[in-house]
Amino acid sequence: MEQQPVNADAYVRSYLADPGTYWWSTNHYSAREADVVLKRVLAIIAQAQLPDHEKALGQLGVGPLENMMSDTLLDRLRHWMPFTPAMCYALSNVRMEFEPPALQRRLNVMIQESQHKNGLE
């Protein structure tokens, strides 16, 4: 049996090294655990580097970030602007076609502003 990471930094390193093993730690949660999971997601994204961690970032986009997508989430993420390339990549993996058009536009503008400020257009 694989030993579990013992602290937050070890957890983030483990997730980035093998997102397939730790996917459950960001995907299976109750509504009352959403804040803890968001903190995990943000900690992982903060240490992720492209292109090395594309799989982990994509997994976070189509998993917890997609599940949490709302105006409330975007309000919270506004404090992280401009987004890093890693955050832009994770958010660009969120499937937005089923979200309200206003939410789609809002996320798109946030990503575009961040890319512009980071010189990544």
Image (cartoon, helix red, strand yellow):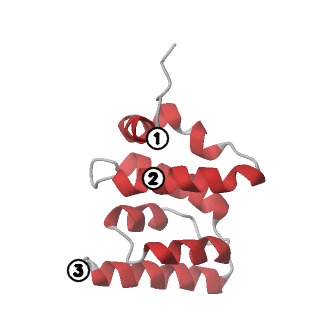
Residue 8: horizontal and vertical position, in percent?
46, 41
**Upstream in sequence: badge 2 or badge 1:** 1
Q: Is residue 24 above or below residue 82?
A: above
Label for residue 8?
1
Query: Looking at numbered disc 3 in the image, what kind of residue is underneath it?
Result: Gly
Quarter of the figure with residue 98? bottom right
Which dot, 2 or 1, sits closer to the camera? Answer: 1
Contact, mark 3 vs mark 2 (Cβ under 8 Å): no
Label for residue 27?
none
Q: Look at 46% across and 35% down and name the residue there.
A: 7
> Mark 3 — residue?
119
Contact, mark 2 vs mark 1 (Cβ under 8 Å): yes
* Residue sitting at the far top: 1
Quarter of the figure with residue 104? bottom right
> Mark 2 — residue?
43
Cα–Cα gap, marks 3 and 2: 24 Å
Lateral position of residue 119 relative to residue 55, left or right: left
